[in-house]
Amino acid sequence: MQQEALQRETEELLHVQGRPRPVHGWGVPQLLWYLVFLQPIITELHLRRRNVQFLFIRFSAWQYEGTDKLWAGLVTTLCEGIRRHYGALPFSVYSVLGNKPSTATTGCCEREWHCRRRVCLALLALLAALCLGVGLLYLSLGGHGSGVHGGPSGSVLKVFGGAATTLSGSGLLMAVYSVGKHVFVSQRKKIERLVSREKFGSQLGFMCEVKKEVELLTDFLCFLEIYQRRRLRVVLEVTGLDTCYPERVVGVLNAINTLLSDSHAPFIFILVVDPSILAACLESAGNMKGTADNGYLFLNRTVTLPFSVPIMGRRTKLQFLHDAVRSRDDLLFRELTHKLRWPGDGDQGGDEGAQLLAVETQPAGSERAQGRIDAEAARRIQEALLCLHDERDCLYEYVPDNVVSMRRIVNTVPITVRLLQQQQQQAGRAGPTPRQAVAWVVLANQWPCRLSWVLQCLEDRQQAGGAPDGRARLWDVFCDNSRELHTMTKALQNVLDLDGDPELFERFLGADFPFTVAEAQSLLRCTVNLDHSIRRRMGLIRAVSALKPPSPPKSPARDAPHAAPGAGNAAGASPGHGAGHTSGAHPRDRTHGGKPRPMS
């Protein structure tokens, strides 16, 4: 947008004589002169101007989440941003003495500024009255000082002089006081006071007062457009809206519609949101029933230019991954700082912190061994991260087109590699390579539900006594238990939404990275980016579904011959432990005393 504005400005200066006027520095006195004594006219020349200036204002909805009137925070941020950009004095002068721009009539000259005769005459009248009053007071006081007894004429001069001075001076002081009041009391404070009044906030005139403040701001921007000889557009970047409550989201959208209700409003709103979350908020809001039953239709009526970020290309993704990897220079920085010595090593008079940092707590041999371990870890981490953004490797294809996910993966790789290195040192044998470690991190980040299901199936099979084959592939284990996972889609719907593309999951485990059961069990001990609560939830659902319903009770006629030996026990049993429960006990579940062991 800035490049477009610069290009338009260059093209406009080739056809127009007048250059844009500055509004900062030495241009402020000229701006104040125009604000007081001249009235702008919207002419055809102004409407044909194509050069534009963008004023960007950022609004984070999360910062105002704690307030009941989130939309009021949007309006106050808008007013405060414009006031900060152009200064408090010009806007205060316009609030007191400014005049709304008028439209040029047909057949009128193309003059953009007309003299405000009423203001000039009123100011001249006040100055003349002030000079006259001061003169009369001087004559009355001068005659009295020279010994001349004024009598009635001296009293009359004094009265008229005092009245003229008081009236003219009070008029000028009131104007200065009004300007000073608007300088110290901004629009933001006015709106905050209106919001703080609970009784006034519930009345119909509350939004009308806010609308007046917005119209005043719009007229001021229109005045500046004619003064600067360029179009002005205020761009509000609204972020964090999809992290707020549904009622807050509705309030912000209503405030946007209120600001855009004027067809000539110089506002552009950029909503950086997730449409699915925003649509769900609109549908769940209690005050939008009947209006936004379909959140997507409501957004289509509000947003005039929907723009979805396209899929990231290969070159762009590699560049983002490279930038994320370059930010992980903590190990290299640690090696460089480890070689440096503290400046106050031999200074006993230094501060306590320097003396503590200078203490060597490990022997020289242990320090050298730890240095070799750190160097090997840094080499492994660099090798793993290189595989992540290597164009010749296929691993980057499975990384999502999301900068946050990229940084999450890059931040997890060093921890996983260090834990894997420590595990291999304790076991004394080689294990998964750094490439397999970073691929495992990507797998846990992209398909946490499907990976947790495979691991839970392996755990249940091991607990049942059947140890899985270590050379079996994870993809084969998933295929063997995929039907059971399909029956749990309703109970695991929220967890399944975390997974990425299923086709990519099949290609990942089936072709590019065929992890075996032994490699998965080795990497599972080093996994830090997989939520284990997903596995526990799956295990609980699987255990509940494995329970068989109790067998129906048998008829008394068929059980009569067998019920006689246990009649005494049945008669003494409680109501909750009837014959059906006793007959369900397995013979091997009996203890040494012959009593049946209760089943869980």
Image (cartoon, rainbow, N blue to C red):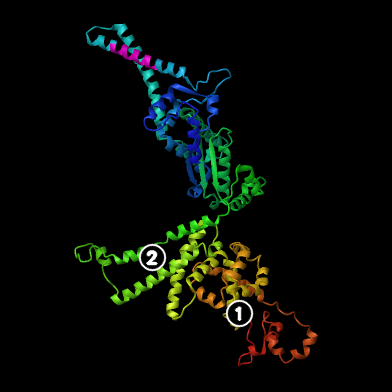
Q: Where is residue 215 in the image (x, y as percent from the top left)?
A: 53, 32
Q: Are there few (<14), some (14-19), or many (20+) residues within 10 Å of tag 2?
A: some
Residue 170 shown in magenta: no
The first of marks 2 and 1 along the sequence is: 2
Left of 410 or right of it: where is 513?
right
Kind of residue at disc 2: Leu
Boundaries of the magenta span: 125-138
Q: Where is residue 254 in the image (x, y as percent from the top left)?
A: 58, 42
Question: From what the image shows, is residue 515 above or below residue 48?
Answer: below
Q: Quadrant of residue 400?
A: bottom right
Q: Position of residue 437 (x, y in %)?
A: 49, 70
User: Which circle, 2 or 1, is nearer the viewer?
Assistant: 2
Q: How many marks?
A: 2
- Among all residues in the image, which is located at the extreme front? 392
Residue 133 shown in magenta: yes
The residue to which callout 1 is attached is: 461
Q: Are there few (<14), some (14-19), or many (20+) residues within 10 Å of tag 1?
A: few
The residue to which callout 2 is attached is: 331
**Chief SS of the magenta region:** helix
Question: From what the image shows, is residue 560 above or below residue 267?
Answer: below
Q: Which residue is drawn at 28% across and 10% down?
A: 139
Q: Distance between the residues labelled 2 and 1?
A: 40 Å
Question: From what the image shows, is residue 592 above or below residue 394?
Answer: below
Asked which secondary structure carries label 2, the reply is helix
Q: Residue at x 50, y 66 (%)?
A: 529
Kind of residue at disc 1: Arg
